Image (cartoon, rainbow, N blue to C red):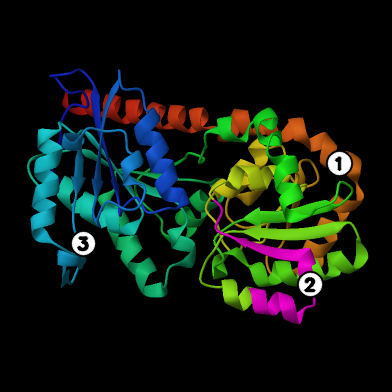
Amino acid sequence: MTMRSSGFCARCNKIGVCFVVNNFNVGGLEKVVLDLINNIDRDKFEPSVICIDGPGKIFDRVSLDDNACLVLDKSQSIKTPLGTFDPMSLWRMKQFFTKRCVKIVQAHNLGPLLFGGLSAHLGYQRPTMIYTEHNQFYSASPTARRKFIFYIRLADHVVAVSHDLQRTLAHRVKPTAPVHVIHNGIDGSRFDLGAGAVGRDEVRAELGVGGGEILLGAGVVLSKQKGLEYLLEAARTVISEEPRARFVLAGDGPLREQLERKAGELGLGDRFRFLGYRSDMHRVISALDVYVLSSLWEGLPLALLEALAMGKPIVATRVGGNPEVVLDGVNGFIVPPRDVGALSHALLQVCRHDGFRESVRNVNRERFETHFSLQAMVKAHEKLFFEVASERHNLFG
């Protein structure tokens, strides 16, 4: 194994950290990395970023100088026994690490792990490799999982976004590197109870929701992962038994036509509406009385954190980090995935107890601030980076 040098840059006395991602297309992972880059303490850390597959749609939100960014083109890659990559890109990444005095590389998901890990291992002195797993392993094919078990050996440290994911990795992957849990976090300022209430009445009026009605729903990608066919089935029961209940789904995705067709077949009519893509998701969430997430697998979904920050009671499935956000019977309910009966029962419970919905507002906001805020996530990463840098300094200082 190649030697790792001291963790602090002698020139600027900061810790050089490079974040490696596929790109900055819209998604939860990308938002997490953006927030890390833009909010890490610049007096102590020197951040940089590498995109291995083009810049992506929200790359312009990266608040770094051009010389701190390296954008590669994955389409030039070739197939090898180890995977698909471009040897010249690996060399460019290694040069970038050296030029930027990078001491810590943090890769997010499998492709960046391979590119970042191989590049980091080139040469005599190398940066420490941290790999962050979000939720890719849950949905990976058997072939991809076998590759993952091999690739993760490139990491010196592993970060899991939930305790459930940490247990899954320990049981099914058995990484030799230490695994740390750092929950995702979001900027709660847009989801503040006071600020969020501003758009509530406007959105409800736009949707034709009456003052006495109960609006349930979510803002998600309409994909298989989200288990939305089970939500539709549960909604039919809820609507038939609770006349005040109405549902909305904000977001787009590959299953939209299929789900709209199924809603029609179930006779849900205008009491279950598909809103499509919304750029004002925080206003849509503010209009909801209950947030529902019927996912089949998750890491730690940012959507739940947005609902938590808004003080919404949440009904979610027992997958991934969901039970770490929602305490069953305290600030919402947790139900088994694919269980229409349990989901409809929990939704009816929340609908029928007006006092419960009101009581969780401040509980959820306090829980968000303590465990899942942007500040909490950034501080946890900074703590890990300091520990890694100090470890390097003690070993090779």
x and y, in percent, of residue 122 in the image: 11, 48
N-term-proximal mark, 3 vs 2 = 3
Q: Are marks 1 and 3 in contact (CB under 8 Å)?
A: no
Asked which secondary structure carries label 2, the reply is: loop
Asked which secondary structure carries label 3, the reply is: helix
N-term-proximal mark, 1 vs 3 = 3
x and y, in percent, of residue 40 in the image: 37, 28
> Which residue appears at 14% of the width and 19% of the height?
10
In the image: residue 314, left or right of residue 93: right
Amino acid under disc 3 = Lys
Amino acid under disc 2 = Leu
Where residue 268 is drawn, which disc sits there?
A: 2
Q: Quadrant of residue 364?
A: top right
Residue that badge 1 annotates: 356
**Residue range corresponding to the magenta coloring:** 260-278
In the image: residue 4, left or right of residue 145: left
Marks 3 and 2, how far apart at CA: 44 Å
Where residue 74 is drawn, which disc sits there?
A: 3
N-term-proximal mark, 1 vs 2 = 2
> Which residue appears at 35% of the width and 52% of the height?
57
Q: In which quarter of the image is residue 344?
A: bottom right
Marks 1 and 2, how far apart at CA: 26 Å
Does the magenta portion include 268? yes
Q: Which of 183 and 262 is in front in this view?
A: 262
Q: Nearer the viewer, residue 335 or 50?
A: 50
Amino acid under disc 1 = Phe
x and y, in percent, of residue 308 in the image: 66, 40
Q: In which quarter of the image is residue 89?
A: bottom left
